Image (cartoon, rainbow, N blue to C red):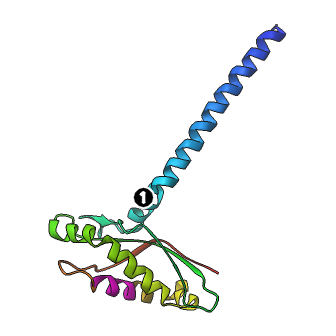
Amino acid sequence: MVSEGAMTRLERILIAVGAVLLIVIIAGTAYAGITESRTRKLARATVPLAASDNGVFDGLGRIRAKSADDVPAVIVVDIAFPYDASDRQFSEELSRKRGDLREAAGSFLSGKRASELHPSGEAAVKAGLRDTLNALLSLGRIDELYFSEFRVIN
């Protein structure tokens, strides 16, 4: 038979272990949210394997913009695209122009109405956005864009 004092000690140990596990889970979730590691992983996962043999550029991060509506909607997009990672000059250009590419993508999306950004028109949005980004690049081209996240919040 277990004494009353031993059970209390066992309960305290279990509570302490549970608290430590809870702290580890919260800290891991916060770290993943801060570093956006899940978003980058999803961006890579959305690019078909055949297209991502050389590399996937997901360095633009999450882009937020407001639509051109009278009551603007919030647009959230996370862009990735395959590119030839062995082309060092193009890789450097992408890194160097990262800010300009983000700004151009935000401007492109801000010029659209929420109705134009409906999922049924996603191909047209991707084509227009691709052309906008390619206009800024001189050492290579983006052939196809992938969205790991694309939301229009009214």
Residue 132 colored magenta?
Answer: yes
Q: Is residue 75 above or below residue 44?
A: below
Question: Image point 38% across, 89% down: which residue?
Answer: 128
* x and y, in percent, of residue 55 in the image: 27, 64
User: In the image, 41: left or right of 139?
Assistant: right
Rendered-image quadrant of the N terminus: top right
Classify 10 Å Cα crowding around label 1: few (below 14), some (14-19), many (20 and above).
few
Q: Amino acid at mark 1?
A: Lys
Where residue 81 sits, quadrant-wise, is: bottom left
Q: Main secondary structure of the magenta part?
A: helix
Q: Is residue 3 above or below residue 117?
A: above
* x and y, in percent, of residue 39 in the image: 46, 61
Secondary structure found at label 1: helix
Magenta stretch: give its range.
Answer: 127-134
Question: Image point 17% across, 64% down: which residue?
Answer: 86
Can I make out residue 79 in this image? yes
Closest to the observer, 49 or 76:
76
User: In the image, 13: left or right of 95?
Assistant: right
Q: Is residue 100 above or below residue 132?
A: above
Where residue 136 sits, quadrant-wise, is: bottom left
User: In the image, 127: left or right of 74?
Assistant: left
Question: Image point 41% across, 65% down: which residue?
Answer: 43
**Residue pointed to by mark 1:** 41
* x and y, in percent, of residue 154 in the image: 64, 81
